[in-house]
Amino acid sequence: MAVKIFVGKLSFDSTDQSLNDLFATYGTVTSATIIMDRATNRSKGFGFVEMEDLKSAQKAIAELDGKEFEGRTIVVN
């Protein structure tokens, strides 16, 4: 069962691929999506990562919450 994780306070320069790469070190990533503003086509500063299993997701949340990623301290939950 896939587990969806919220990732906030992302850099506006972050991409789906960089988010995927960050979480891939903790397990299999099913999807990684940064939410974009429709009017400006600019990142809204948050996104979602879906991981394949609960154990990998919990480890990623525990280790990445409050860490610096691309110049910003991210929130992961």
Image: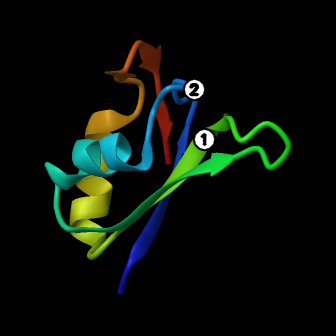
Residue 45, placed above or below residue 49? above
Q: Give the image quarter of residue 18.
A: top left
Q: Secondary structure at mark 1?
A: strand
Residue lying furthest front in this view?
40
Q: Nearer the viewer, residue 37 or 28?
A: 37
Seen in the picture, residue 26 relative to 66 is either above or below; the reply is: below
Q: Which residue is mark 1?
A: 46
Badge 2 amino acid = Phe
Residue drawn at point x = 31 percent, y = 52 percent: 20
Q: Is residue 3 above or below residue 62?
A: below
Q: CA distance from mark 1 to mark 2?
A: 9 Å
Residue 45 in the image, given as x and y percentages of width and height: 63, 33
Label 2 secondary element: loop
Q: Of marks 1 and 2, which one's residue comes earlier in the chain?
A: 2
Q: Which residue is mark 2?
A: 12
Q: Residue at x 37, y 20 (%)?
A: 70
Q: Nearer the viewer, mark 1 or mark 2?
A: 2
The extreme right residue here reads 39
Q: Position of residue 34 (x, y in %)?
A: 55, 48
Residue in view at x 58 percent, y 28 percent: 9
Amino acid type at image mark 1:
Phe
Residue located 41% across and 12% down the image: 71
Q: Position of residue 62 (x, y in %)?
A: 31, 42
Q: Counting other residues with Cα less than 10 Å from the Cα at mark 1, is it few (<14), some (14-19), or many (20 or more)?
A: many
Tell me the number on the disc at residue 1.
none
Q: Residue furthest top?
A: 71
Answer whether labels 1 and 2 touch (C-beta < 8 Å). no
Residue 22 appears left or right of 44: left
